[in-house]
Amino acid sequence: MQCTVQWEGSDGMAFTAHTETGHTLRMDGAPASAPGEPGGHNLAPRPMETVLVGTGGCTAYDVVFILKKARQDVRGCTVRLDAERATADPKVFTRIHMHFVVTGVNLREDMVRRAVELSHTKYCSASAMLEKTAVMTFDIEIKSSEI
């Protein structure tokens, strides 16, 4: 897997990433908090936000795949990630809580819970990396969908 990240120039802290699969992602920094400090223009997500988003995408992908494989009639999956970071550099994630909302028809709670657990303990590469520094927790909410 490859990507290229390129600084957009001297007028801020924006970067453009190009992925091996042909996609583009823009990242930017917060405006400078003091004169002379590097700052962005707040026009795109921060790099660490993209790490958190990638983790959410990785685990949601797993959950949907596992439920479909188990022949559950899953119709939607949303995961909200709430994270805390260390106060000193490097400001790694120290706590991440994931709230899953899974929608479907006659979903079995035990299967949804197991899909989330399997993602966290076996399949999600992003979670596996982040759990080296962060305490990771989750909860689930199941919503019924119309047939």
Image (cartoon, rainbow, N blue to C red):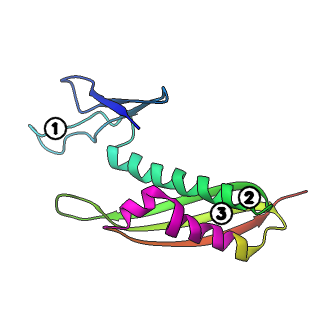
Q: To which quarter of the image does residue 39 belong?
A: top left
Q: Which of marks 3 and 2 is in front?
A: 2
The extreme bottom residue here reads 110
Q: What residue type is labelled 2?
A: Lys
Quarter the C terminus occupies: bottom right
Q: Which of marks 1 and 3 is nearer the N terminus?
A: 1
| Boundaries of the magenta span | 112-132
Dot 2 lies on which element? helix
Q: Is residue 77 above or below residue 121?
A: above
Q: Which labelled disc corresponds to residue 17?
A: none
Residue 28 location in percent, x, y? 32, 36
Dot 1 lies on which element? loop
Q: Which amino acid does label 1 sit on?
A: Pro
Q: Which labelled disc corresponds to residue 38?
A: 1
The answer to whether 69 appears left or right of 51 in the picture is: right
Which residue in the protein does label 2 denote?
Answer: 69
